[in-house]
Image (tube, rainbow, N blue to C red):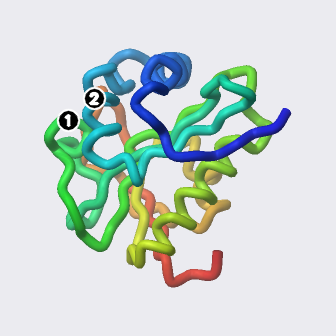
């Protein structure tokens, strides 16, 4: 397995949608239209993991001035330019590639992008069971999120970028 992490391109849309559908229930996952928007609105913050010519994972999100991820950021047109915070709207890996470090590579690459761009922090929301996973990457649990995306209880996670990588 030779995984390459790179910026997503518009021609990756089908592969991106397949990864998302495998990673999230329909109520929580992004739509094709949402991904098309994200690829055009913030391509610099959209990474994919590729094995050969196959998209096997993704991570993406916009810059924001909001302290935590808010539901409007999930919607086409909800992104804003600038802001000291980089949000993660989604991290997903195809089932057959899970538990092999692909998600960790995507997170580390995303954190490197944030650091290089001078972002002060990276934020995400996750389900309770994933809190320990994100803590391994320096994220701190800030409690139950105001987000109601997909009708799920989410937890706000924050990673200050002044920490050692």
Q: Position of residue 98 (x, y in %)?
A: 72, 31
Instruction: Name the spot of residue 109 as percent of width and height, x first.
Output: 60, 57
Left or right of residue 100, residue 121 in this image: left
Residue closer to the observer: 162 or 109: 109
Residue 83 drawn at (x, y percent): 24, 69
- Left or right: 136, with 73 as reference point: right
**Residue tagged by mark 2?**
34
Q: What secondary structure is found at the residue carrying circle 1? A: loop
Residue 34, quarter of picture: top left
The 10 Å Cα crowd at callout 2, few under 14, some 14 to 19, many 20 or more, is some
Of labels 2 and 1, earlier in sequence is 2
Q: Can residue 38 be seen in this view?
A: yes
Query: Which circle, 2 or 1, is nearer the viewer?
Result: 2
Q: Quadrant of the N terminus?
A: top right
**Residue where numbered disc 1 is placed:** 75
CA gap, disc 2 to disc 1? Answer: 7 Å
Q: Are marks 2 and 1 in contact (CB under 8 Å)?
A: yes
The vertical placement of 77 against 36, above or below, is below
Q: Is residue 3 left or right of residue 160?
A: right
Q: Position of residue 47 (x, y in %)?
A: 51, 45
Relative to 107, 28 lies left or right: left
* Residue for point 59% across, 53% down: 107
The residue shown at (64%, 74%) is 165
Neighbour class for label 1 at 10 Å: few (<14), some, many (≥20)?
some
Residue at image x 20%, y 35%?
75
């Amino acid at each position: 397995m030779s995984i390459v992490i790179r910026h997503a391109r518009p021609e990756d849309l089908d592969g991106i949608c397949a990864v998302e559908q495998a990673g999230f229930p329909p109520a929580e996952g992004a739509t094709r239209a949402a991904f098309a928007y994200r690829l055009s609105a913030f391509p610099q913050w959209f990474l994919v993991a590729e094995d050969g010519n196959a998209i096997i994972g993704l991570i993406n999100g916009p810059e924001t001035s909001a302290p935590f991820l808010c539901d409007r950021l999930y919607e086409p047109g909800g992104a804003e330019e600038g802001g000291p915070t980089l949000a993660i709207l989604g991290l997903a890996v195809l089932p057959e590639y899970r538990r092999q470090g692909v998600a960790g590579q995507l997170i580390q690459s995303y954190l490197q992008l944030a650091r290089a761009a001078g972002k002060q922090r990276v934020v995400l929301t996750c389900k309770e069971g994933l809190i320990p996973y994100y803590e391994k990457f320096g994220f701190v649990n800030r409690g139950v999120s105001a987000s109601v995306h997909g009708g799920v209880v989410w937890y706000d996670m924050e990673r200050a970028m002044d920490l050692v990588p």
